[in-house]
Image (cartoon, rainbow, N blue to C red):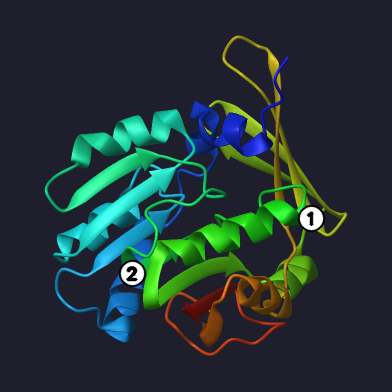
């Protein structure tokens, strides 16, 4: 039987959307507004949304008049995203570890901790190199990641989340420098289900080192979606801007 990674099973599942239905869409949209205001891309800049999901951010970027491409590993997500395609917006099924359109994009974005999913560091380095290869010279990469120290300081070992008729029992731990989140619940047919999220607990120094190997330099770091300064022990996010 072919092994599938946790993210292939979980992100394509309807339960993922049920558990995370309360994610703040307006906050996410305001973040993109702030980023665009900060970056000041030229009209018709080419942009890549890496791990785009169902295309929420890509659609927003295209609404500004940029030329946007979204890539994701989930068939289900890309099928939904394709409904929004137009002359300035297209979506492809693609694994972020492998190159895509070499030296093509002015900007690349990786939103909402959509990195660090792999068990082996070589896969993360492969992904970093693929991100870099997609950019033109002087191209910009934005990565929005969890902030390790703040997450570990506030991590609850066990939690219960109620969503309608579903009760999700969530346990978290740090193991092999990955933050492991186990999600258990009973589905509508009374079957027990179990999903796992595993995200590498990378620090800012880890990112700098990894993306340096890919030929990218860190030029700015922010600590939240309002683009306030980054503080390792306090900031809710770690938003990094790299340049090729």
Q: Please give the name of the residue rendered at 58% of the width and 66% of the height, measured from the top-left corner.
A: 145
Using the rendered view, name the quadrant where residue 196 is placed.
top right
- In this rendering, the answer to whether 214 lies above or below 68 is below
Q: Please give the name of the residue rendered at 55% of the width and 25% of the height, measured from the top-left corner.
A: 165
**What crowding class fits label 1: few (fewer than 14 Cα within 10 Å), some (14-19), or many (20 or more)?**
some
- In this rendering, the answer to whether 89 lies above or below 112 is above
- What is the total number of numbered labels drawn onto the structure image? 2
Image quadrant holding the N terminus, namely top right
Query: Is label 2 in a helix, a strand or a loop?
Result: helix
- According to the picture, the residue beneath numbered tag 1 turns out to be 178
The numbered mark at residue 32 is 2
Query: Is label 1 in a helix, a strand or a loop?
Result: strand
Measuring from the top left, give residue 198's x and y in whole percent: 72, 47
Outermost residue, right direction? Answer: 176
Horizontal side of residue 124 vs 137, given as left or right: right
Of mark 1 and mark 2, the one earlier in the sequence is: 2
Q: Give 218 or 83, whichever is nearer the viewer.
A: 218
Measuring from the top left, give residue 202's x and y in whole percent: 72, 67
Structural distance between the alpha carbons of marks 1 and 2: 28 Å
The numbered mark at residue 189 is none
Measuring from the top left, give residue 225's x and y in whole percent: 45, 74
Q: Please give the name of the residue rendered at 33% of the width and 47% of the height, measured from the top-left corner.
A: 55
Horizontal side of residue 28 vs 156, given as left or right: left
Q: Please give the name of the residue rendered at 59% of the width and 86% of the height, measured from the top-left corner.
A: 230
**What crowding class fits label 2: few (fewer than 14 Cα within 10 Å), some (14-19), or many (20 or more)?**
some
Measuring from the top left, give residue 150's x and y in whole percent: 71, 73
Residue 110 in sight from this viewpoint: no
């Amino acid at each position: 039987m072919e092994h599938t990674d946790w993210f292939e099973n979980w992100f394509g599942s309807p339960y993922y959307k049920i558990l995370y239905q309360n994610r703040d869409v307006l906050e996410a949209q305001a973040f993109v507004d702030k980023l665009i205001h900060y970056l000041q891309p030229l009209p018709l800049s080419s942009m890549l949304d890496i791990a785009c999901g169902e295309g929420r951010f890509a659609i927003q970027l295209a609404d500004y008049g940029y030329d946007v491409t979204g890539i994701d590993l989930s068939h289900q997500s890309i099928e939904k995203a394709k409904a929004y395609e137009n002359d300035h917006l297209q979506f492809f099924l693609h694994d972020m570890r492998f190159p895509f359109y070499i030296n093509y994009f002015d900007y690349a974005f990786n939103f909402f901790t959509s990195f660090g999913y792999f068990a082996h560091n070589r896969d993360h380095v492969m992904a970093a190199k693929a991100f870099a290869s997609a950019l033109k010279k002087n191209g910009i990469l934005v990565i929005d990641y969890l902030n390790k120290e703040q997450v570990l300081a506030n991590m609850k070992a066990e939690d219960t989340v109620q969503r309608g008729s579903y009760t999700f029992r969530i346990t978290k731990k740090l193991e092999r420098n990955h933050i492991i989140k186990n999600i258990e619940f009973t589905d509508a047919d009374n079957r027990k289900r179990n999903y796992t999220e595993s995200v590498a607990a990378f620090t800012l120094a880890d990112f700098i080192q990894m993306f340096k190997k890919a030929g990218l330099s860190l030029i700015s770091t922010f600590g939240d979606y309002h683009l306030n300064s980054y503080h390792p022990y306090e900031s809710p996010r770690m938003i990094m801007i790299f340049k090729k």
